[in-house]
Amino acid sequence: MLSTALFKPHEIFETADTYMTIESNNRSGELVPSDEVSSLIQYSLGSLGLNADCEVSITFVDEAEMTELHIKWMDEPGPTDVLSFPMDMPESVGQAVTLGDIVICPSVAARQAASAGHSINHEIYILAAHGLLHILGYDHANPADEKVMFELQEKLVKEWGES
């Protein structure tokens, strides 16, 4: 995890006889769809065949904090929309692990949503799915990988919205 102080509230979602912990924290000063993002992550993990006991942390931050994280971890200036911090990957099918942290900047998401012509919430859902896929090892460094990753993030959000 980024820091134990970052993630205090736990949301436990019951699915059949198993539990998955999604930690959510909003330090952005913005209204964000925390419950919906947690639900999306829960749905996505199940859809991707991961153990329901895997843990994911989601933090919403303001532009100043995102800029600090972007400089520290990516050595790039300015704020970005989403950062992912992978922790553990399952070594076997069904293994429950702490997958990692997703950090989203809602104000950057709002600008991107306006440019894309969809809602801020939809942009945040896309960023949450995008962050989760990065945690799981997906990347978009080349056009072929980008196509796979972006199609999968859109599919996850669409199917979750229809569920």
Image (tube, rainbow, N blue to C red):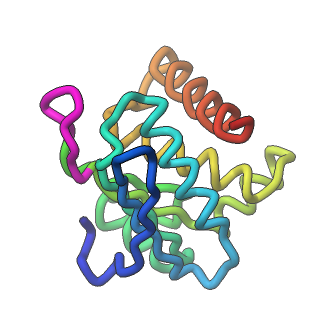
Q: Which residues are magenta?
A: 89-98
Image quadrant assignment for residue 58: bottom left
Q: Quadrant of the C terminus?
A: top right
Tell me if 129 is positioned left or right of 94 in this view.
right
Is 57 drawn above or below residue 100 in the view shown?
below
Rendered residue at 42%/57% (across/down): 102
Residue 155 or residue 35, whichever sits in front: 35
Whole-percent x, y for residue 36 in the image: 63, 58
Residue 37 or residue 149, whichever sits in front: 37
Whole-percent x, y for residue 28 in the image: 57, 79
Tell me if 139 is positioned left or right of 32 in this view.
left
Q: Quadrant of the N terminus?
A: bottom left
Q: Residue furthest right?
A: 117
Residue 123 or residue 162, whichever sits in front: 162
Rendered residue at 15%/28% (across/down): 92
Tell me if 45 is positioned left or right of 34 in this view.
left
Would you say the magenta stretch is mainly helix, strand or loop?
loop
Tell me if 133 is positioned left or right of 161 in this view.
left
Total marks in image: 0
Rendered residue at 44%/36% (across/down): 46
Whole-percent x, y for residue 95 in the image: 19, 37
Whole-percent x, y for residue 32 in the image: 66, 70
Q: Residue furthest left?
A: 91
In the image, is residue 55 part of the stretch drawn in magenta?
no
